[in-house]
């Protein structure tokens, strides 16, 4: 029985036929004779029209999506009409261009390749945009050829989707009724594919070399927790898949109040991006919002949204959680989320550049106006609003952000702990604010110096890494040291780590007070936490901290949580 191994990013044991993503759009030929009556101007207009059509199609898909899927589609739509890409292609249509004139298809192909190479050379977050550029290129070339855009294959039966990697715009609109699992040969645990698979509740494995060569229709068994794919499974694995389906259906819906075995409460909150997301999270029982991503209000536009527009957007989220906590993350622009009115696309290393809170240094006023909008939206609703800044590195930055919040009338300022320096000096940082929330995706990337999108570095970019868990503990310990006179500084987790039921137990044992995740993960996390006491969670945290590797930490903890196998997690 042939076996493939990768990084499991969403649990589940399923069996089904493989369908491969269609092969990439064929590269246009070089040195094609261009008829004399076809002008560069007419070719240039074709490129502009095709780019606009692709952008319109992506925007239409974004209008029917929500949350992270909506954000991904809107960001890709922006890329489709990128003036630099279109202008670069049009320049290649001229007979004076190096190598002579190209067809419209060839010109956009070469121009996009140049942009992609430039982004790849920058590394970090900008390298993550390469997949977006190549996806947009394929769509524009298809539009120019009058062919359907590349996308998810059609099927009359549910299937496991296999690919080298998935374009964000495709992953964002997967139909879970047809696509029952995802397997890719590249990508990392924090890639768009992985994050959206978790949000959709699809079992998924990434960085599994060779799965993109499995023949269409081949039946495979996938274990998303173990990270294994087995071809032509036997009866034992068929029974395992059936058992998992039965077990998964028995996980009770989240009650809306998470209590551990000894009665200790650990509130389970939701990560949301829009008012529609917030309504779904409230319906799923979320005890509040642990991360409101405000980027959705700023994407797909060339200028800053007005304060009134922001008030309406934030108010839609606050209205879904009257009397409950809603933690708002201020604009996390920069790196993989460039905004034309706020960020500089020419930074040599955007992942370490002006992003998040740091944009206030180069574009003062945007953050203050956002805080004013948040305060106005809070005043018009009954939610308990907390506000945190991303990419805080020092106590001085935390103090400045707290001052801005106070000036806006916001009473509960906090910080995101994503930069190792903030974890190492947590006591000093948290003396300046009221709370902290750990962004484990970025914290892992920065701690391990491993680009979170790169498949070959997937084992490094794992929140189970003992070094990352040490930073979590340092943050919780620093928060305890900063708490005085009854003024507690709670620490939450809003990164993807919180959605892993086994890791959630460890995080609680390390001193984390709240966990925030996609609404789909609430029931499973609560079911596992209900089986352990705080003392047991602390023992498991010690086990994970002392492990020599991420895989050893995960295996040691899971071995002591039999509920995971019982529930197929």
Image: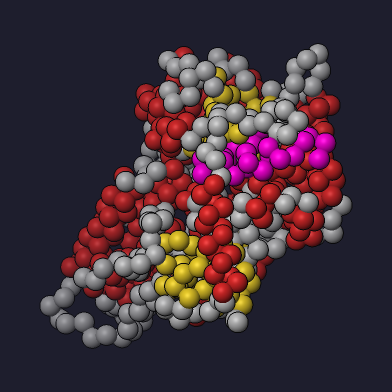
Q: Is residue 145 above or below residue 327?
A: below
Residue 367 is at least partly visible in this image: yes
Magenta region = 514-536
Q: Is residue 497 above or below residue 308?
A: below
Q: Residue furthest left?
A: 37
Q: How many marks?
A: 0
Residue 532 in the magenta stretch? The answer is yes
Rendering coords of residue 359 (x, y %): 56, 38
Residue placed at 75% from the left, 44% from the top?
506
Q: Is residue 293 above or below residue 551?
A: above
Residue placed at 81% from the left, 46% from the top?
540
Q: Nearer the viewer, residue 26 or 552?
A: 552
Q: Quadrant of the N terminus?
A: bottom right
Rendering coords of residue 170 (x, y %): 39, 60
Q: Quadrant of residue 134?
A: bottom left
Rendering coords of residue 536 (x, y %): 81, 40
Q: Nearer the viewer, residue 16 or 498?
A: 16
Residue placed at 77% from the left, 36% from the top?
533
Rendering coords of residue 379 (x, y %): 46, 14
Q: Quadrant of residue 51?
A: bottom left
Residue 272 in the magenta stretch? The answer is no
Residue 222 relative to residue 559: left or right: left
User: Is the image coloured rainbow, by chain, by secondary structure, or in one colour?
Assistant: secondary structure
Residue 378 is at least partly visible in this image: no
* Principal secondary structure, stretch drawn in magenta: helix
Residue placed at 84% from the left, 50% from the top?
543
């Amino acid at each position: 029985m042939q076996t493939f191994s990768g990084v499991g990013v969403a649990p589940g044991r399923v069996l089904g036929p493989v369908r491969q993503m269609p092969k990439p759009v064929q590269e246009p030929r070089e040195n094609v004779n261009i008829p004399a009556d076809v002008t560069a101007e007419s070719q240039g207009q074709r490129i502009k029209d095709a780019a606009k059509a692709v952008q319109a199609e992506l925007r239409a898909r974004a209008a029917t999506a929500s949350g992270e899927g909506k954000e991904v589609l809107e960001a890709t739509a922006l890329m489709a009409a990128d003036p630099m890409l279109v202008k670069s292609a049009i320049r290649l249509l001229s007979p004076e261009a190096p190598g002579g004139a190209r067809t419209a298809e060839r010109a956009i192909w070469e121009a996009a390749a140049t942009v992609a190479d430039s982004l790849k050379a920058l590394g970090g977050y900008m390298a993550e945009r390469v997949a977006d550029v190549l996806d947009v290129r394929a769509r524009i070339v298809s539009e120019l050829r009058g062919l359907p855009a590349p996308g998810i294959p059609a099927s009359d039966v549910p299937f496991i989707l296999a690919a080298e990697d998935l374009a964000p715009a495709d992953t964002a609109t997967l139909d879970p009724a047809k696509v029952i699992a995802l397997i890719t040969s590249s990508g990392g645990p924090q890639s768009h594919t992985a994050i959206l698979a978790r949000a959709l509740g699809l079992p998924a494995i990434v960085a599994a070399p060779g799965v993109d060569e499995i023949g269409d229709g081949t039946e495979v068994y996938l274990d998303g927790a173990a990270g294994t794919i087995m071809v032509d499974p036997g009866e034992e694995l068929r029974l395992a898949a059936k058992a998992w389906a039965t077990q998964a259906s028995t996980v009770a819906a989240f009650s809306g109040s998470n209590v551990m075995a000894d009665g200790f409460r650990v509130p389970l909150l939701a990560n949301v991006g829009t008012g529609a997301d917030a309504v779904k999270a409230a319906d799923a029982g979320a005890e509040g919002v642990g991360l409101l991503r405000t980027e959705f209000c700023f994407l797909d536009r060339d200028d800053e949204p007005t304060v009134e527009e922001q008030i309406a957007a934030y108010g839609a989220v606050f209205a879904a959680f009257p009397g409950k906590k809603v933690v708002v993350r201020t604009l996390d622009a920069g790196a993989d989320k460039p905004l034309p009115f706020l960020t500089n696309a020419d930074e040599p290393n955007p992942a370490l550049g002006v992003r998040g809170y740091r944009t206030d240094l180069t574009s003062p006023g945007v953050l203050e106006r956002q805080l004013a909008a948040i305060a106005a939206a809070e005043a018009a609703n009954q939610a308990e609003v907390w506000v945190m800044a991303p990419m805080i590195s020092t106590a001085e930055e935390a103090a400045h952000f707290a001052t801005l919040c106070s000036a806006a009338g916001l009473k509960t300022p906090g910080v995101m702990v994503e930069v190792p320096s903030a974890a190492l000096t947590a006591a000093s940082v948290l003396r300046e604010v009221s709370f902290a929330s750990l962004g484990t995706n970025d914290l892992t990337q920065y701690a391990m110096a491993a680009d979170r999108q790169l498949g070959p570095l997937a084992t490094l970019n794992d929140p189970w890494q003992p070094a990352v868990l040490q930073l979590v503990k340092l943050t919780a310990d620093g928060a305890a040291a900063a708490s005085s006179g009854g003024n507690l500084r709670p620490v939450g987790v809003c990164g993807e780590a919180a959605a892993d039921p086994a890791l959630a137990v460890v995080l609680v044992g390390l001193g984390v007070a709240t966990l925030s995740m996609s609404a789909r993960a609430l029931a499973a996390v609560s079911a596992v936490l209900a089986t352990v006491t705080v003392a047991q969670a602390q023992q498991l945290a010690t086990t994970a901290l002392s492990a020599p590797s991420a895989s050893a930490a995960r295996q040691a903890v899971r071995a002591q949580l039999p509920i995971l196998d019982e529930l197929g997690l």
